[in-house]
Image (cartoon, rainbow, N blue to C red):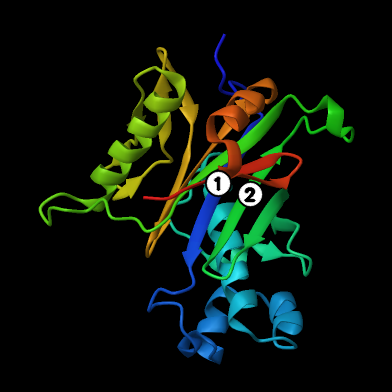
Amino acid sequence: MSIFLSTSSVVFGNDIIDLNDPDTTEDHLNDRFINKICTENEKEWFFKQKDLITLWKIWAIKESSYKVISRMEFLPTFRYKDFEIQKDFIKTFYKNHQIINDIYVEPNYILALSYIDQNLSVFKEDQHFVFVSWLKKDLNLIKDNKIKPSVEIRKYVESTMEKLFFEKTKIYRKYLHKENLFLPPYLYFKKRFYPISLSHHGRFLLFSLALKKHFIDSIDKFYKDHIIKISDLHFLITEEN
């Protein structure tokens, strides 16, 4: 029996923001950039705060929410204003879809995980799965300029999975040449495909999986003091070099 969640009723996506990266500056706190990513309702409560952390929380959640929807339907372009976030950041709305968000803020980074579970129970003890995210800090994987960062990142994820599960895994991403678009990635494990969400920015790499709930005990023993409970459904593992 696989440890990975095999149901298609749960879809998820993630995003990571390196707050020390040169791209995340106060230069983005201008009307043009904010108008690009925020709906009118979002701007109404955002402008009362107008700080960088709030801005990048919005950005990260919209990125992770986009990954959720892209697993459900074909999205050739990403329009930020198609996704509207509630003021408390817990939910995102896209057309008739309601997406649930986990947002985690540290001094150096912002992490977002978004998901839709059509069978989500109101009773926490009835949940049959958990999300587990791995965060690699001080990323230094790219040693050869001829190798694409995505190749090195896939190698790192695959080696991490093999170390934990004692099984070889492979990440697959189908490329649509006509649309010039990569479809969401999948992890190949024991002759089956399971969704995986990848994100990297600056010095950080993040990847997330949906696992059977009982396996969290094994992960807890393996990583000991490196696991953080973000919510009842989401656990974060931090890894140093």
Q: Residue furthest front?
A: 225
The residue located at (75%, 56%) in the rendering is 91
48 to the left or right of 75: right
Q: Is residue 171 above or below residue 183?
A: above
Do labels 2 and 1 touch, CB within 8 Å?
yes
Residue 203 in the image: x percent, y percent?
37, 62
Question: In terms of image quadrants, where is residue 127?
Answer: top right
Within 10 Å of the Cα at label 2, are there few (<14), some (14-19), or many (20+) other Cα atoms? many
N-term mark: 2 or 1: 1
129 to the left or right of 113: right
Query: Pointer 2: what residue?
Result: 114
Q: Is residue 241 above or below residue 71?
A: below
Residue 38 in the image: x percent, y percent?
62, 75
Inter-mark Cα distance, 2 to 1: 5 Å
> Does residue 95 appear in the picture of this structure?
no
Q: Is residue 13 above or below residue 163?
A: below
Indicate the secondary structure of the residue bearing disc 2: strand
Query: Pointer 1: what residue?
Result: 13
The residue located at (39%, 26%) in the rendering is 163
Amino acid bearing label 1: Gly
The residue located at (69%, 21%) in the rendering is 214
Amino acid bearing label 2: Ser
Indicate the secondary structure of the residue bearing disc 1: strand
Question: In terms of image quadrants, where is residue 87?
Answer: bottom right
> Does residue 214 appear in the picture of this structure?
yes
Residue 112 in the image: x percent, y percent?
60, 56
Q: Is residue 156 above or below residue 95?
A: above
